[in-house]
Amino acid sequence: MKKSILNGVMGGVVAALVSSAAWAEPVDDELVIDGDIKMVVRTKAPEGHPFDEIRSGWQYRTKETRALEVDSFNNPGMLRVEEGEGIWNTADGTEGKSCADCHGDASESMKEVAAHYPKWDAQSNRPINIELMINKCRTERMGAEAYEFDKGGQKSLTAYIKHQALGTPVSIDLTQGDMQSWWEKGKEEYYTRTGQLNLSCSNCHEDNAGNYIRADHLSMGQVNGFPVYRLKQADLVSLHNRFRGCIRDTRAEQPKAFSDELMALEVYVTWRGTGLSVETPAVRN
Amino acid sequence: MNSARNLIAVAVMAGSLAATAAWAETAPDDVKFEDGAVAMSVSGNAGDAKAGAGVFKNKKLGNCLACHANSDMKNELFHGEVGPALDGVADRYSVDQLRAIVANSKEVFGDQTVMPGFYTLKVGKNPAKEFAGKTILSAQDVEDVVAYLATLKE
């Protein structure tokens, strides 16, 4: 008798899990940071996009996780942004210069800037992102060593610079240089299945956005919040780190950070988020 | 006398052949898909439903729950919803069809399906060294999972 009641209760729990479709949809919640900065977390997709409407990953997270991004004091990623501010103002390299020595106050010089990256870099004849732009300044202007991927102050400084574009809608210029062909290459990668599990980006983030894969609520895979504070790692996670993690999870060899493959993917996936506000540092699972 | 001895020899050979056949594993590339079904055990042995339940929920093996809900595993948290729920799956498919779906669902549902092929070498680009040339599940794992799925009736 007791057992059958228990089974009944468990059955109810399973029914709730199984019928999770009801709460599997992203929430139609609005994000206003510090009661002041109104973020675009849901907008019409750019022309040629597979979706009519795009949504920030913020809408796919739980109420608790969403709340962490609403107030800067509660956002654990802001500590690393502050660290980035320290780096911005600290001289480094043989030239004895800091970022601020050339660029001044980042809240003015870097305002909205990161919303328009990656950009075309004629010198290297490929797209350049914030991380590589920092390295370019370090090696060419400061006489400092380039940061290795995810090391030194790379994540914090990138987050600090991107944070200066908080709220600005993402828009990149595909007419510069060969940006369009890198976009095409990135698009091809997005739909290419990789690894032993034979999965493409689109299999999860396009075909199954909104569905649960085990405990993970699959989002559209937007990149407007990177570097993001990931609760799982309890740290900032860079975009190329996340790209590599996803690819690893398909049981494929991981391309190197900033390789042609991942730069093309960054161009394409950034475009897929056109119109969403820069959220750096976003808070995710 | 001679013929009796020959008969014995033939019988022994036949016996050992039969035994070989019973143990013969079918290599992934040799699995025959016909009309969305695989008629023979890929391991050459019967599956064990209990072991199959283990393969089903093990994240490094089948990890089936990642995508499929299954009321039979109500004690496990977080059932996925990428694929259909598997309640009553044995009422919808025969054992041979279930074997085909597990071994390589693309042979049954077409190339568009998201479901990985668990006993095939037709995989995505650049498989990691650790997994290259290997199937996700062993032939016996496949048979065990199929035996487990065959118990899911409504």
Image: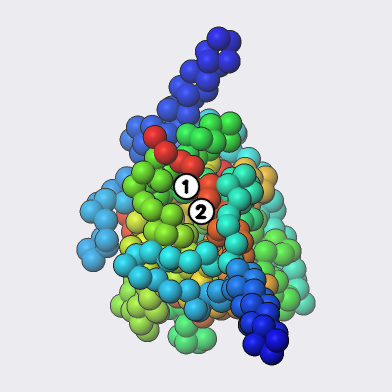
Which quadrant of the structure image shows residue A23?
top left
Asked whether, in this view, residue B133 is left or right of residue B125, the answer is right
* Residue under the point 43% across and 66% down: B38
Residue that numbered label 2 is attached to: B146
Q: Are marks 2 and 1 in contact (CB under 8 Å)?
A: yes
- Label 2, residues with CA under 10 Å away: few <14, some 14-19, many ≥20: many
Furthest-bottom residue in this view: B2
Residue that numbered label 1 is attached to: B150
Amino acid type, mark 2 = Val
Q: Is residue A116 above or below residue B27?
A: above
* Residue under the point 31% across and 77% down: A175
Residue A11 visible in the shown view: yes
**Residue A77 placement (x, y as % from top left):** 61, 45
**Residue A249 placement (x, y as % from top left):** 57, 61
Distance from disc 2 to disc 1, alpha carbons, whole Å, reads: 6 Å
* Residue under the point 53% across and 47% down: B148
* Quadrant in which the C terminus of chain B is drawn: top left
Furthest-right residue in this view: A94
Residue A163 visible in the shown view: no
Instruction: Please state which of residues A21 and B89 is positioned toward the viewer in this rendering.
Output: B89
Asked whether, in this view, residue A196 is left or right of residue B95, the answer is right
Subunit that carries the residue with mark 1: B
* Residue under the point 42% across and 34% down: A18
Instruction: Please state which of residues A193 and A236 is positioned toward the viewer in this rendering.
Output: A193
**Residue A62 placement (x, y as % from top left):** 49, 34
Q: Is residue A118 above or below residue A126?
A: above
